[in-house]
Every structure is written in C-alpha cells, then in structure tokens.
C-alpha cells in the first residue's frame, strides 16, 4: 500500500501530478475539492453549505471534511493506497487523519511539498480547465490539448472551468494556504515524511522528482 499527500498552493500542479501518480501506481487520487464539488453537484445539504463557503474562497469545517474522507477511504478502490491532494490544511485535520488511519492500521508514507512561486499561480489557475467527460486537466497556454478543442484522453469536446478559478478568489485562496501550511509542513517534517519538489519545473521534470521519492 502506498499512501501519499501532495501539499502546495492552488495551481502548484497537485491535480496534474496526482493523476500521473494514480495511473502509474494504481492508487486513487482523493481531492477534497472534487469530493465537495460532487456534493454540490448532487445538491445535498452538505453540498449547499459547502458551496457558500467555497464561493467565498474560504475553507469548510474540519469536521465535515474528516467525515467525508472516513467513508471514502474505506471503499475498495483505495486498497492499493491513495493520494490526498490539498489535504490536510489544518493541524486538527492532520491529527484527525492520523487517528483515523491508526484505527485502520495504515499510515502516510510520503508528504510531498510542491514549492512554487505565488505570482505564477494566478495565471496557471485562471487558464485551467478540465474535460467534462474524463476529468483530464488542461491549460489555455501551458497544457492545451494536441488537437484544438478535443480531449487527448477520451476525445471529448466539452470542457468545464471551476467557478472559483478567478484571479480574485485565487489570491484569497493563496493567502488562506500560506496561513495554514507552515504548521502542517512542520507537523510532517517532525514525522520525517516531508519531502520537497520544485513545482516550477516543467510537468515531466516534477513527475521525475516525485517518482524518485516514491521509488
Ligand atoms: P492544483 O491541483 O495544485 O491546484 P493543477 O494541477 O490544476 O494545480 O495545475 C494548475 C494549472 O497549471 C493546470 O492548468 C496545469 O495544466 C498547469 N500546470 C500544472 N503543473 C505545471 C507545471 N509544472 N508547469 C506548468 N504548468 C503546470
Ligand atoms: Zn476527456
């Protein structure tokens, strides 16, 4: 089993790298944002609460997130391991995660911190979009599909953009990230599982650095 956490500000490339790691190691990418957006799309009560908070660029409660994750990692598709993308963001979340994992007899093997330059993140985020059918990630200029308007992976022609991927919300999210990340990085550094990669490098180079850590 290989359990991994990717840390980095919005736009750092967590989603991009998580998808590559997922395919290579047959483990499942768990994005809190995706789980929450699924709840929003389903129109659940939890989804409606989460939507208000996310639209404002703020963070949903630890309690709500840990509940959602507990049931998610118990599903059979997580048996080879999982990648958390952008979670945990607070010390109480990290502690709750540890407690929950200990109860299930599993542990986090590596925490990979993607180090990037904040200013570059605004253009990365405002230009990104995903295939509506298969979820493949693209960017207007940094990572466009090979044939204009057609998904490389599935041939889909419809794409979606996240409502909160605008410059103003990105700046709020970057601020929230920095306020929370230093203690989280410290928490995992203490456990000896924290490793850094250069998130400003081209996508394949970042993938190589992550593969070197995972072995
Ligand atoms: P995150 O999940 O950390 O918010 P994404 O993986 O969605 O970030 O990446 C944000 C955007 O930047 C995407 O459009 C992606 O194609 C692009 N991107 C990701 N990694 C890199 C990189 N190393 N260099 C250039 N662009 C990148
Ligand atoms: Zn697709």
Image: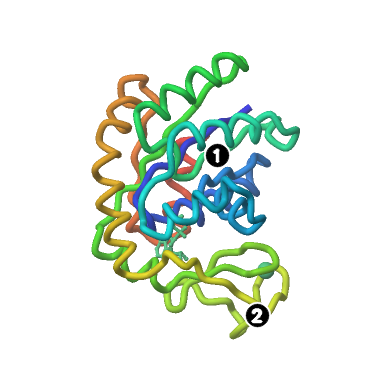
Badge 1 element: strand
Residue 214 lies, with reference to residue 122, above or below; the image says above
For label 1, the crowd category at 10 Å Cα-Cα, with few meaning under 14, some 14 to 19 and many 20 or more, is many
Disc 2 is placed on an element classified as loop
Which of 46 and 90 lies nearest the eye of the viewer? Answer: 46
Residue 10 picture location, percent across and down: 38, 55
Which residue: 30% across, 48% down?
A: 115
Q: Residue at x 51, y 37 (%)?
A: 65
Check contact, mark 1 vs mark 2: CB within 8 A: no
Q: Quadrant of residue 173?
A: bottom left
Instruction: Point out the tag, 1 or 2, that comes first from the N-terminus.
Output: 1
Label 2 environment density (alpha carbons within 10 Å; few <14, some 14–19, many ≥20): some
Q: Quadrant of ligand 2?
A: bottom right
Q: What numbered label is drawn on residue 150?
A: 2
Image coords of residue 215 (percent x, y) = 52, 34
Above/below status of 174 relative to 127? above
Is the residue at mark 1 in contact range of ligand 1, meaning its CB lies under 8 Å from it? no
Within the image, what quadrant is residue 146 found in? Answer: bottom right
Q: Report which quarter residue 200 is drawn in.
A: bottom left
On screen, residue 28 versus residue 48, left or right, reads right
- The answer for how far apart the CA atoms under marks 1 and 2 are is 28 Å
Q: Is residue 184 visible?
A: yes
Q: Using the rendered image of the protein, determine whether residue 21 is visible from the camera's viewpoint.
A: no
Side (left or right) of 58 relative to 105: left
Residue at the spot x=49%, y=66% of the render?
162
Q: Which circle marks residue 83 in the picture?
A: 1
Along the line of sight, the residue nearer the viewer: 17 or 48? 48
Name the disc covering residue 147, or none: none
Label count reads 2
Q: Position of residue 174 (x, y in %)?
A: 29, 54
Q: Whole-percent x and y of residue 25?
A: 64, 41
């Amino acid at each position: 089993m290989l359990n991994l956490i990717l840390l980095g500000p919005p736009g750092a490339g967590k989603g991009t790298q998580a998808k590559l790691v997922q395919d290579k190691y047959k483990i499942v990418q768990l994005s809190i944002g995706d789980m929450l957006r699924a709840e929003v799309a389903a129109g659940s009560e939890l989804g409606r609460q989460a939507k208000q908070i996310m639209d404002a660029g703020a963070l949903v409660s630890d309690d709500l997130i840990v509940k959602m994750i507990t049931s998610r990692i118990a599903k059979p598709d997580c048996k080879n391991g999982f990648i958390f993308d952008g979670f945990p963001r607070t010390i109480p979340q990290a502690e709750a995660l540890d407690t929950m994992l200990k109860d299930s007899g599993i542990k986090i093997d590596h925490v990979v911190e993607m180090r990037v330059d904040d200013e570059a993140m605004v253009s990365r985020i405002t230009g990104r979009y995903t295939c509506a059918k298969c979820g493949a990630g693209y960017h207007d200029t940094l990572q466009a599909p090979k044939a204009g308007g057609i998904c490389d992976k599935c041939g889909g022609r419809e794409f979606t953009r996240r409502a909160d991927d605008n410059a103003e919300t990105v700046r709020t999210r970057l601020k929230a990230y920095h306020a929370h990340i230093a203690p989280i990085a410290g928490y995992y550094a203490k456990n000896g599982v924290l490793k850094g990669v250069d998130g400003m490098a081209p996508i394949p180079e970042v993938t190589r650095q992550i593969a070197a850590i995972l072995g």
